[in-house]
Image: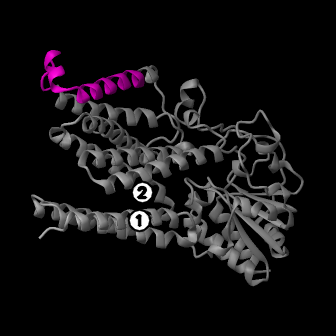
Amino acid sequence: MLLSPELTALLYLVAAVCFILALKGLGSPKTARRGNLIGAFGAVLAMVVVFLSTELDNVALILGVIAVGTIIAVPASRMVKMTQMPQLVALFNGVGGGAAALVALLELQHSTTIGAFIAVAFTLLIGSISFSGSVITFLKLQELMPTRPIVFPGQALVIVLLLVVGLASAVIIVLDDAVLVGLGLAGAKTVAAIVALLVGLVLGVLLVLPVGGADVPIVISLLNAGTGLAVAASGLVLSNTLLLVAGTLVGASGSILTREMAKAMGRSVTGTLFGAFRGGSTAGSTAVSDRPVRSSSAEDVAILLGYAQRIIVVPGYGLAVAQAQHTMAELATTLEAKGIEVVFGIHPVAGRMPGHLNVLLAEANVPYEVLAEMDEVNPQFKNADVALVVGANDVVNPAAKTSPGSPIYGMPILDVAAARQVVFLKRSMRPGFAGIENDLLYEPQTTLLFGDAKDSLTKVLTAVKNL
């Protein structure tokens, strides 16, 4: 016996509330785990309700596909490294968009109203763009393809032509059958839908190829928003309120996150997507400065840290790349055992995506209580004896405040320059993503320790233990 429409609607409402609470929980590292579990419960509840409220065909096949997905997903989630979490998010996002596009393609034959055809056309284009674009972001983050912007002659023109073809296909999908017959295009809806799907797949690739590796997190968030909108549209196609609610939540949150990430990096979304076409490169400069700096040894840095009273650690992308979070956590614990206060200052876009470094440090058992967001930690730098910068650069560059002509001018930064002493752990003197020098490196209170972050921290940790 199937569930009544009233009970089905009530259970869908419970699932929707779970999704809202999940988003709320994911807003803080302290509640993220609980939020994730609430969201997972909501998804399972929604799936169970579908089975109990709908007369399904091919139930055995559906259960078999669910089993295969589970067999793939569980080992993958356990084996993936925390440093590879953004890649996994990109793949999840792509799968969602691809699934929405396939549903729209299958539902084309069952659609009868103009609104349904508009939703089908929208879902086909946006879902397929999200799928192929997310695959490219995965390949870039995984370094299976070059992370630099890839542009070829005429690429912008090809994108424009594909957009025209995609829109023309969408118009054909939406037009009434009688109109199509009058135009000699009887039966063209199916062909147009397939063309829209293929155009979307190619567009997704061409739109992401020109994006440099450091901008990929913004694109992941943008594609995530697109996937949410595609899912919401598929909810209209299937007359499923829960899909509409869930897709709208993802689309709205992804759009807000994209805007905030771009703002935090001092960039525009259009500049991120199309900056390479203007002759620039979103990869930044690789030129090495020959200005003199003060460098030091691991032993000297250990002495500086060992005799401090308050230390603020500023982790960055270099920490994640070197997978040095466990060594950093052990160093912090060792310093705290000596009576030294250690706080971690986290910039909103440090790492490859928001929350990336929070997750890395949490995995290394760094307490949530010592992770401070930018607005919270900035007033504390003036009272810090040492600011230890590990693999960060642009997010601490004073040029964001002092150089109106700088590419990062106006970007919120961590006020590391206010600390009494600054220790930079860097591989080399190459500039950060923005391609500009960091004047903080040349200040008299700044000391540089060159080398791989993990190796350098290991040496510093050993020296601190021997103090």
Q: Give left or right: position of 360 versus 344.
A: left
Q: Which residue is mark 2?
A: 88
Q: CA distance from mark 2 to mark 1?
A: 25 Å
Give whichever of discs 2 and 1 has the lower sequence position.
Answer: 1
Residue 17, label in figure: 1
Q: Outermost residue toward the top?
A: 183
Which residue is at 85% across, 75% downward? 307
| Quarter of the image where one finds residue 80 | bottom left
Q: Residues within 10 Å of mark 2 (few under 14, many from 20)?
A: some
Q: Is residue 148 visible?
A: yes
What amino acid does circle 2 point to?
Answer: Leu
- Quarter placement of the C terminus: bottom right
What amino acid does circle 1 point to?
Answer: Val
The residue segment tinted magenta is 158-187
Dots 2, 1 in contact, CB < 8 A: no
The reply to whether the magenta stretch includes residue 163 is: yes
The reply to whether the magenta stretch includes residue 243 is: no
Which residue is at 62% across, 56% downward? 318
Q: Give left or right: position of 50 versus 295.
A: left
| Quarter of the image where one finds residue 102 | top left
Q: Position of residue 234 (x, y in %)?
A: 29, 46
Q: Position of residue 287 (x, y in %)?
A: 69, 37
Residue 170, label in figure: none
Magenta stretch: helix, strand or loop mostly: helix
